Image: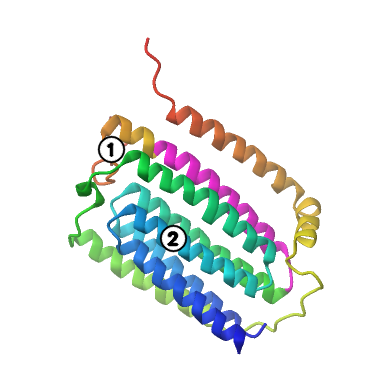
Amino acid sequence: MMVPLSHYLVLSGILFVLGAVGVMARRNAIVIFMCIELMLNAVNLALIAISCNLGDMGGHVFVFMVMTVAAAEAAVGLAIIVSIYRSRGTVNVDEIRLLKW
Amino acid sequence: MAEMITFYVFGGLAVIASLFMITRRNPVGAAWSLIVVMISLAALFVLLSATFVAAMQVIVYAGAVMVLFLFVVMLLNLPEEELGKPKVTGAKIFGAIVSLGLLVELLVVALVDDLPGKELSKGFGEVAPVAKELFSTYLLPFEVTSILLLAAIVGAVVLTQRERKK
């Protein structure tokens, strides 16, 4: 492996923080979901890089699991957003912060 | 050297596209930027000889998940004012400080001395060896995953159903 492991980890860290910034800064629930996907992707990159460094394929299996969870999360999360939009007419998280209505 | 160049091209592309994603006001633009990030990451996975995961990344993430996102964005057809007006609040300043701290922390952890890389076995990261791992060592988690997907399908169907008239 010619590219050092730390390069991949730094890139992964930067992408993770950008995703976290998006989650904190954006108000649109759909974009917040996209930022969560970005954070999951950053973690995937770290897992694959370390897996390649150690010569162990366990990391690939974990990435597979993370992808499954991300797909399930996207499906359920977007379903929740659609049903909230139907009942409240907005997806702005500043306006839908009550736990009970 | 070629690997270095590939890494910096696709890594830079991923960072720029994610910056785009968190600054675009239009959710469709954000979704497109996220697709660019995912495809750049797939290229990096190939560089790390994880060809199966790279294919999965393009098919599952850039394909299925992002189609779902774009579908919902277009289904809801959000008016312009819903896209969020940029304004500076105390919470955002606090968030910026927290994220900077997180970035520094992650960089400190990431900039460790490199572990001595091991020789990769033949066919590392290809479909057959990954499948062998998946269906022997990690068989139980794999099966539990299918239950998770079933639960997600049922949940999504129940949540999006319109309420029946009584």
Q: Are dots 2 and 1 on a single chain? A: no
Q: Residue at x 63, y 57 (%)?
A: B56
Find the magenta span and give its range. A55-80
Residue A14 at what x, y percent from top left? 44, 72
Residue A44 at what x, y percent from top left? 57, 63
Residue A3 visible here: no
Residue B148 at what x, y percent from top left? 61, 40
| B159 displayed left or right of A29 | right
Residue A81 or A13: which is nearer the viewer?
A81
Which residue is disc 1 drawn over? A98
Residue B142 or B81: which is nearer the viewer?
B81
Which residue is disc 2 drawn over? B34
| A100 displayed left or right of B5 | left
Q: Is residue A58 magenta?
A: yes
Residue A26 visible here: yes
Residue B32 or B138: which is nearer the viewer?
B32
Residue B109 or A10: which is nearer the viewer?
A10
* Secondary structure category for the residue under label 2: helix
Q: Residue at x 75, y 52 (%)?
A: B138
Task: Say above or below: A39 vs A97.
Answer: below
Q: Residue at x 50, y 45 (%)?
A: A73
Q: Residue B73's quadrant in the figure?
A: top left
Residue A12 at what x, y percent from top left? 50, 71
Q: Quadrant of the N terminus of chain B?
A: bottom right
Q: Residue at x 28, y 43 (%)?
A: B78
- Outermost residue on the bottom side: it is B1
Q: Give the colour scheme of this rendering.
A: rainbow
| B86 displayed left or right of B97 | left
The tag on residue B29 is none
Indicate the amino acid at tag 1: Leu
Determine the chain carrying the residue at label 1: A
* Secondary structure category for the residue under label 1: loop
